[in-house]
Image: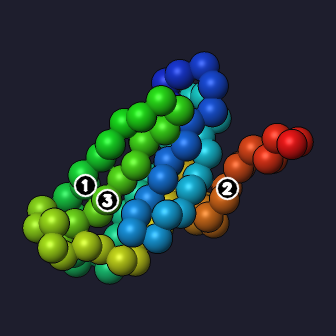
Amino acid sequence: MENAGNRDLCLFIEPYGEDFYLRPGEVFTVAPEAEVIDVWFSTLVWEGGITVWPYEDGDPTKIVLDCTVTDINGTRLECGHQRPPKPAS
């Protein structure tokens, strides 16, 4: 995923609801933990973000549960990476 926009973009990985925020120009890679799995991705684009569902062999009943998100340098990112602070209420 590349954020070609001019503001932060939320990358939301299902089924666990993990979120990662890409700043403008950043590139993240989503991949399965097990490299032998043929993963297809279902994506939903919404204002401010992208939701990704990884499926094995494109079968929506075979959800890939263990995925990694890495930056352009190959650094593994944790859920909440660059999450903006909650607005004051």
First-in-chain label (2 vs 1): 1
Name the residue: 59% across, 41% down.
Answer: 22
* Of marks 1 and 3, the one in the foreground: 3
Question: Could you tell me if the residues under marks 1 and 3 are in contact, i.e. CB atoms within 8 Å?
Answer: yes
Secondary structure category for the residue under label 1: strand
The number of callouts visible is: 3
Disc 3 marks which residue?
Answer: 53
Name the residue: 25% across, 73% down.
Answer: 63
First-in-chain label (1 vs 3): 1
Secondary structure category for the residue under label 2: loop
Q: CA distance from mark 2 to mark 3?
A: 19 Å
The residue most toward the top is 6
Disc 2 marks which residue?
Answer: 81
In the displayed structure, would residue 47 be above or below residue 32? above
Disc 1 marks which residue?
Answer: 41
Q: CA distance from mark 2 to mark 1?
A: 21 Å
First-in-chain label (2 vs 3): 3
Residue 38 shows in the view = no
User: Quadrant of residue 36 in the image?
Assistant: bottom left
Question: Could you tell me if the residues under marks 2 and 1 are in contact, i.e. CB atoms within 8 Å?
Answer: no
Name the residue: 61% across, 45% down.
Answer: 21
Quadrant in which the N terminus is drawn = top left
Secondary structure category for the residue under label 3: strand
In the displayed structure, would residue 15 be above or below residue 89? below
Residue 86 shows in the view = yes
Say which amino acid is labelled 1: Phe
Query: What x and y, as percent, mark residue 79?
Result: 61, 64
Density class for disc 2 (Cα within 10 Å; few <14, some 14-19, many ≥20) is: some
Density class for disc 1 (Cα within 10 Å; few <14, some 14-19, many ≥20) is: some
